[in-house]
Amino acid sequence: GQIFENEARANELIAFYQDTVDEISTTVAEAAKPRVLILYYSEKDGTIAFNVPPLGWMQTLLVEMAGGEPAWKEAVLGYNWTTVTLEQIAAWDADKIFIVSYAQDPSAIVATLKADPTWQELRAVQTDELYGFAGDIYSWDQPDPRWILGLSWLASRLHPTLFPSYDGEAEAQAFYQFMYGMDAAFFEANLLPTFKGDLP
């Protein structure tokens, strides 16, 4: 705001983020915290890997802010995504599992995993709590301005009864209009077709 000599607009943006975080924090404060597992799906040279983020990364912080308990919190982690085995995933026995992918639509990956007999043994799959993390051009789990959309979406998935009126499309449209001045027609033509993951 100081650099562009528009501190009023900077304060509006700060308030937008802070108000959203505060509203979600207050809403989930007294709710039971589900055990949550976020897995980054990567595929290289035909080898598939599942990875968990460091504790200080945005993905972990989003789980905590959204009212969840990161299942991997007690694991020995590195300074980047840490590859974990399916045996470890099963041992964590998360209530809800979220698949992140930066190269594919995570909802397609989720569909494949749900059809896999090995994954069908996981409690989260049996209870239909396996999701593809939402996003548009970029996934909403990353530390760019869209993380606030990821927080709202994740909170609605962790605590659906506390956010019964959540509408991902409407919230994203309002976000892009407020942040970047995009009108509804531009949003529908250029951003809506890029939506991916399990958006209600």
Image (spheres, rainbow, N blue to C red):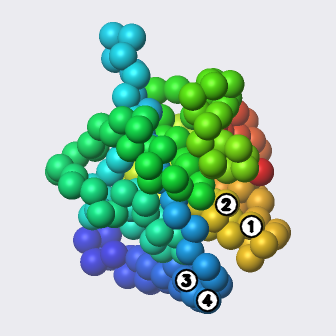
Disc 3, SS: helix
Please tell me which residue is depicted at 38% across the width and 44% down the height of the picture. 88
Residue 28 appears in the rendering: yes
Judge the density around disc 3: few (<14), some (14-19), many (≥20) Cα neighbours within 10 Å: some
Query: Which residue is the site of mark 1?
Result: 160
Which badge, 1 or 4, is on the more N-terminal residue? 4
Q: Amino acid at mark 2?
A: Arg
Of residue 150 and residue 191, the one placed in the foreground of this image is 150
Q: Are discs 1 and 4 less than 8 Å apart at CB?
A: no
Q: Would residue 84 appear left or right of 36 to someone viewing this image?
A: left
Query: Which residue is the site of mark 2?
Result: 157
Query: Which residue is the site of mark 4?
Result: 30
Of residue 68 and residue 125, the one placed in the foreground of this image is 125
Which badge, 4 or 3, is on the more N-terminal residue? 3
Judge the density around disc 1: few (<14), some (14-19), many (≥20) Cα neighbours within 10 Å: few
Residue 25 numbered mark, or none = 3
Q: Are discs 2 and 1 less than 8 Å apart at CB?
A: yes
Q: Amino acid at mark 3?
A: Ser
- Mark nearest the camera among 4 and 3 is 4
- Mark nearest the camera among 2 and 4 is 4
Residue 121 locus on image (x, y percent): 61, 37
Q: Are discs 4 and 3 less than 8 Å apart at CB?
A: no
Disc 2, SS: helix
Q: Amino acid at mark 1?
A: Pro
